[in-house]
Image: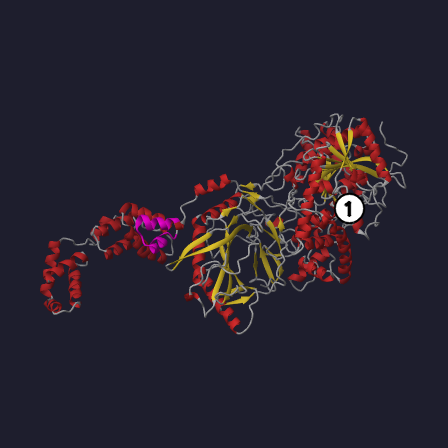
């Protein structure tokens, strides 16, 4: 058997259930790796808690009362509130904050038998594409520690990629699962909006936020997605009343005859040639599997940038008003009155990017600007969603790049945040429409240090199964998802 | 539509954010360059388009779910207040609220 | 947002309502706390008076990750109110966030309704003295209440209690149709009656269940609407009248002095009887309303509205009209006796048994209410049942006892509800003497013993007659039937 940390969620789950491995053994193994984390991927961990959970898990295994993922370790992005660990959302505003309840997603994984390894680093309040906006230091890309892991779920992606945890939760508002998955060479999926409960997920942009799993491959994602999705009618009014699904059921289906749309707007000039090549390679593999490619158009792709960066900050500006130093969170040490307490606490607690988005958000909602900005953006949002509707009448799913390039260098875009907004161009449209989308490793850049490249698959509403099926079939033919950081260039990872 | 320093001050006040001069200027510059991109949206003809407030609408009609009027949350004050900056006799303390 | 029309479309004000030549224009915004067990968006209790922050759950405290889930009963209350006020109940309405910072507002925004409220239009009709008046409603919408700030025990600090945060409210907004403080108070009382009648609100004003904001302005008749000032949080009818009266005079003085009225929010101070401006909120607040992304649109199916309509009790106005037409009661009586559903049903039960509507109404409005007030209780806890009152009234109507004896009887029953009326009449000797023979004999005796008075009467002094009646009543120990006595005496003296 490979080393424990090279086992997938599926393999671990089986081994634990069959008692080939013990829950405590597995937990201890991963805890050691977490403790030697040099990537800044973890924000908190607590061996005592983890081992306690592992012991309880083993009890259940011994009693033949295993959950679907009994004993499998998982780590949660720090925007999911947990009773056992602090929840900071990557912000000074919530330094040391202890929630009195667990997020529904966290609960669901606990019910499935998962063992928590701790909380993962992320861009502050999920705002960012590089994890450099974290108040607790950046997370690093395991493939090249001078590069960003992506964001906002950078800690999640780095931890899974470096095998510090076999599974992680992330959240995706504008690409925050897909892009770091792509930059770190792992698989991640953002389900249809409303599939997973947002209760206990510290809100950034309410109509866009979605929780999703990040792991080694599509099979793992399917297992994790099955555990975390399902209606939360009691606590989340936006939760879809659609029953939980076994997403592994259709993984074995042939994709012969499947029509895959290639949006011409996704393959324009700004695309890094290496990314383009990797996608070409993926296209070949999929064609070999019987898929047919058609050219489609998503004409408002470019508009998705201003539309997203109006809507998300607007909702965020309101969602973050609760951080006022009154009931929890950072309160300034010195202030002369209530007004000053508010202003100083928030100025001190929030980082620059968060403040900027709050300001932008407040502006576009303010009197006199609402119609021209917020309302107009929501209208174009519908048009973007309608464009997808048309596209899905011509194809079964859509394929394209996740990002225009591979991971950029630390500090490279911090002086010009706008450039990182522009790099979101391919992930934003699916977010705005609420469609499920995933990132699948499909190549490596050659120069200078090999960096992962992911392809994006976008499905129609509640078609996660179909996406995972395509990804799984692709992964049966390729090795990109099996590569580990540290393995050098020279590997082509092409089809077998 | 370029923002002026006056706008930054007004918005910062609305959002209860204390911004130092330098920070305010930097933010002004960044927000303005962002708005250059944003201006594109004004050219789009959205006549008769209904704003998309809830993406799930495109899957099926979205309606607010209503729950039964039952109490199931009880006193958990200690747990809820464990991260409170200032509490006395169960009350959250803040600088005097003047009406 | 619906704004009042600049020239009111209600009939022009009677000159009698003008104050120093100015027309008073008043509109109300009333916040009624709804009778639900749990909060509007969370499952915590809504009881009044609990220890601080023991009824504030994660959602009420706006803890990170908390989300709102709508209370069905609160929506039902809105439907009931809409039906009671003849409003349109919107098939589809939207919840919006009203963004502002205040320590008693945990999320930094209030979930309310802005562009599309659940209840639209409607009206409230009532009497001001004997004059009928109708006030049109703009809208009523659902929203959540904020918490409370306590200042007393803390030096330089305030203590925030969020138990009240999230309590469901209906905010009921009128057109500026009222033209005097009396009209305003009468409106508020009628609205109070309606919301308690249909069990939408408990109406407990001391506990803050029913709070009114009055928008007051003045103008010369025919002129444009004046600038209004808003008197906030009036939670007693007495203060309402005082506050508006003071504010009206204050505004008139300002205008007469040549000062313009500036829009402001003011508070009424019961100690001084004055209104004073609240610390000004910097610029006119920019609430940055937008539809709440956490709450899909509220859809109310026509079937649900019909279901609620079917379960509504008879409304006060309708009941008044019915009492006037079926029982022949004057409007005033009908209004008074329908001040609560309990009193109305007590009345009807009484009349059903004794058939004497006017007598029943007199007794309930009069003696019964007086005694209930004395005991600081309400008709639901009246020691005398409607059955007993009916029996009492029947005895009076039949002439068995006099009205005054009825009062004695009521007193006795009040302290001993188990006593039988017939027994009491015997024991207390309340039985009225109606027998002409006996009365004639009595009169003869009195005439004989009061020759002076007889002579005076025959000489033209009317008063002497009353003196003779008095003597006769005394002789009968108050038990003579007064009407018979009077008639017989008249006959004998003629």
Would residue B6 appear left or right of C198 to someone viewing this image? right
Vertical placement of residue C300 versus C203, above or below: above
Query: C253 or C420: nearer the eye?
Result: C253
Q: Is residue A131 visible?
A: no
Q: Position of residue A448 (x, y in %)?
A: 90, 41
Q: Please state the chain letter of the residue tagged with numbered disc 1 in the rendered image.
A: A
Within 10 Å of disc 1 (Cα), the crowding (few <14, some 14-19, many 20+) is many
Query: C293 or C472: nearer the eye?
Result: C293
Q: Quadrant of residue C472?
A: bottom left
Q: Position of residue A411 (x, y in %)?
A: 83, 50
Quadrant for the C terminus of chain C, please: bottom left
The residue at 70%/56% (across/down) is A346
The local secondary structure at tag 1 comes to loop
Query: C434 or C449: nearer the eye?
Result: C434
Chief secondary structure of the magenta portion: helix
Would residue C73 appear left or right of A279 to someone viewing this image? left
Q: Disc 1 designates what residue?
A: A129
The residue at 66%/56% (across/down) is A368
Q: Quadrant of residue C186?
A: bottom left
The residue at 35%/58% (across/down) is C374
Vertical placement of residue C275 versus C88, above or below: below
Q: Position of residue C149 (x, y in %)?
A: 57, 58
Q: Is residue C328 magenta?
A: yes
Q: Residue furthest bottom?
A: C257
Q: Magenta residues, as a range?
A: C318-339
The residue at 42%/66% (across/down) is C15
Q: How many marks?
A: 1
Q: Is residue A405 magenta?
A: no
């Amino acid at each position: 058997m490979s080393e424990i940390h090279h086992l997938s969620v599926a393999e671990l789950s089986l081994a634990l259930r069959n008692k080939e491995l013990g829950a405590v053994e597995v937990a201890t193994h991963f805890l050691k790796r977490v403790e030697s984390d040099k990537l800044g991927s973890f924000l908190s961990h607590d061996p005592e808690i983890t081992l306690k959970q592992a012991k309880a898990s083993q009890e259940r295994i011994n009693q033949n009362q295993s959950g679907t993922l009994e004993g499998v370790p998982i780590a949660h992005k720090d925007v999911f509130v947990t009773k056992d660990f602090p929840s900071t959302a990557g912000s000074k505003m919530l330094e040391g904050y202890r929630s009195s309840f667990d997020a529904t997603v966290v609960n669901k994984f606990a019910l499935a038998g998962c063992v928590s390894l701790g909380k993962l680093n992320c861009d502050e309040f999920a705002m960012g594409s590089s994890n450099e906006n974290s108040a607790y230091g950046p997370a690093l890309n395991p493939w090249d520690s001078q590069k960003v892991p992506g964001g906002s779920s950078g800690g999640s992606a780095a931890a899974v990629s470096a095998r510090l945890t076999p599974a992680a939760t992330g959240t995706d508002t504008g690409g925050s699962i897909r892009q770091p998955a792509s930059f770190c060479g792992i698989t991640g999926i953002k389900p249809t909006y409303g599939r997973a409960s947002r209760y206990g997920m510290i809100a950034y942009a309410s109509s866009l936020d979605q929780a999703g799993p990040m792991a080694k491959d599509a099979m793992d994602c399917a297992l994790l997605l099955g555990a975390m999705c399902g209606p939360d009618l009691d606590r989340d009014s936006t939760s879809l009343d659609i029953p939980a699904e076994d997403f592994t059921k259709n993984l074995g289906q042939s994709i012969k005859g499947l029509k895959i749309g290639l949006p011409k707007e996704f393959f324009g000039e700004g695309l890094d040639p290496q990314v383009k090549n990797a996608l070409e390679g993926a296209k070949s593999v999929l064609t070999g599997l019987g898929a047919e490619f058609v050219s489609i158009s998503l004409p408002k792709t470019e508009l998705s940038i201003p539309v997203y960066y109006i809507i998300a900050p607007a909702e965020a500006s309101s969602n973050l008003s609760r951080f006022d130093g009154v009931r929890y969170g950072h309160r300034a040490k010195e202030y002369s009155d209530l007004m000053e307490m508010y202003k100083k606490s928030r100025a001190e607690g929030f980082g620059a990017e968060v403040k900027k988005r709050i300001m932008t958000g407040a502006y576009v909602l303010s009197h006199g600007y609402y119609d021209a900005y917020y309302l107009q953006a929501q209208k174009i949002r519908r048009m973007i969603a309608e464009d997808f509707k048309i596209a899905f009448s011509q194809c079964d799913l859509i394929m394209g790049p996740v990002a225009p390039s591979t991971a950029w260098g630390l500090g490279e875009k911090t002086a010009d945040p706008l450039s990182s907004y522009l790099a979101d161009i391919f992930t934003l449209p699916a977010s705005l429409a609420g469609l499920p989308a995933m990132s699948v490793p499909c190549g490596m850049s050659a120069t200078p240090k090999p960096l992962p490249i992911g392809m994006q698959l976008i499905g129609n509403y509640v078609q996660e199964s179909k996406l995972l099926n395509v990804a799984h079939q692709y992964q049966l033919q390729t090795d990109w998802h099996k590569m580990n950081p540290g393995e050098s260039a020279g590997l082509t990872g092409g089809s077998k | 539509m370029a923002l002026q320093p006056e706008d930054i001050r007004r918005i910062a006040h609305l959002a209860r954010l204390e911004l130092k001069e330098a920070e305010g200027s930097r933010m002004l510059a960044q927000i303005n360059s962002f708005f250059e991109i944003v201006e594109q949206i004004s050219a789009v003809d959205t006549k008769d388009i209904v704003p998309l407030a809830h993406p799930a609408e495109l899957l099926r009609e979205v309606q607010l779910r209503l729950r039964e009027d039952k109490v199931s949350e009880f006193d958990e004050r200690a747990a809820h207040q464990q991260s409170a900056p200032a509490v006395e006799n169960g009350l959250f303390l803040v600088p005097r609220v003047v009406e | 947002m619906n704004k009042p029309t600049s020239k009111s479309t209600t009939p022009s004000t009677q000159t009698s309502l003008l104050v120093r030549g100015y027309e008073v224009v008043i509109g109300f915004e009333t916040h009624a706390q709804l009778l639900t067990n749990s909060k509007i968006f969370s499952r915590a209790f809504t009881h009044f008076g609990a220890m601080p922050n023991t009824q504030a759950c994660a959602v009420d405290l706006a803890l990170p990750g908390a989300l709102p889930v709508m209370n069905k009963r609160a929506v039902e209350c809105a439907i009931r109110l809409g039906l009671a006020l003849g409003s349109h109940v919107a098939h589809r309405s939207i919840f919006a966030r009203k963004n502002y910072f205040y320590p008693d507002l945990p999320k930094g925004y209030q979930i309310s309704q802005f562009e599309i409220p659940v209840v639209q239009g409607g009206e409230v009709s009532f009497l001001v003295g004997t004059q009928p008046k109708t006030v049109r409603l703009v809208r009523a919408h659902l929203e959540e209440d904020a918490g409370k700030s306590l200042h007393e025990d803390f030096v330089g600090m305030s203590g925030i209690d969020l138990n009240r945060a999230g309590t469901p409210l209906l905010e009921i907004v009128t057109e500026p149709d009222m033209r005097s403080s009396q009209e305003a108070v009468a409106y508020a009382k009628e609205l109070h009656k309606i919301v308690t009648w249909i069990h939408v609100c408990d109406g407990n004003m001391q506990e803050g269940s029913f709070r009114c904001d009055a928008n007051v302005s003045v103008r010369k008749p025919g002129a444009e609407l004046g600038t209004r000032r808003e008197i906030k949080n009036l939670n007693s009818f007495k203060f309402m009248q005082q506050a508006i009266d003071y504010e009206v005079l204050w505004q008139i003085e300002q205008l007469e002095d040549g000062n313009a009225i500036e829009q402001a929010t003011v508070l009424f101070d019961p100690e001084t009887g004055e209104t004073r401006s609240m610390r000004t909120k910097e610029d006119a607040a920019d609430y940055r309303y937008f539809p709440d992304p956490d709450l899909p649109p509220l859809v109310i199916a026509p079937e649900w509205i019909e279901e609620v309509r079917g379960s509504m009790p008879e409304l006060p106005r309708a009941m008044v009209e019915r009492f006037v037409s079926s029982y022949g009661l004057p409007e005033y009586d009908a209004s008074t006796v329908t001040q609560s559903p309990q009193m109305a049903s007590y009345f009807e039960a009484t009349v059903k048994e004794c058939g004497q509507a006017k007598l029943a109404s007199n007794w309930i409005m009069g003696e019964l209410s007086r005694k209930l007030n004395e005991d600081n209780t309400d008709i639901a806890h009246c020691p005398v049942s409607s059955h007993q009152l009916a029996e009492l009234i029947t005895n009076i109507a039949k002439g068995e006892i006099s009205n005054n004896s009825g009062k004695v009887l009521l007193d006795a029953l009040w302290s001993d509800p188990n006593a039988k009326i017939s027994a009491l009449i015997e024991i207390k000797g309340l039985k009225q003497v109606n027998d002409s023979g006996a009365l004639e004999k009595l009169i003869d005796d009195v005439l004989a013993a009061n020759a002076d008075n007889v002579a005076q009467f025959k000489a033209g002094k009317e008063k002497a007659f009353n003196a003779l009646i008095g003597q006769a009543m005394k002789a009968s120990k108050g038990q003579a039937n007064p009407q018979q006595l009077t008639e017989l005496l008249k006959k004998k003296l003629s």
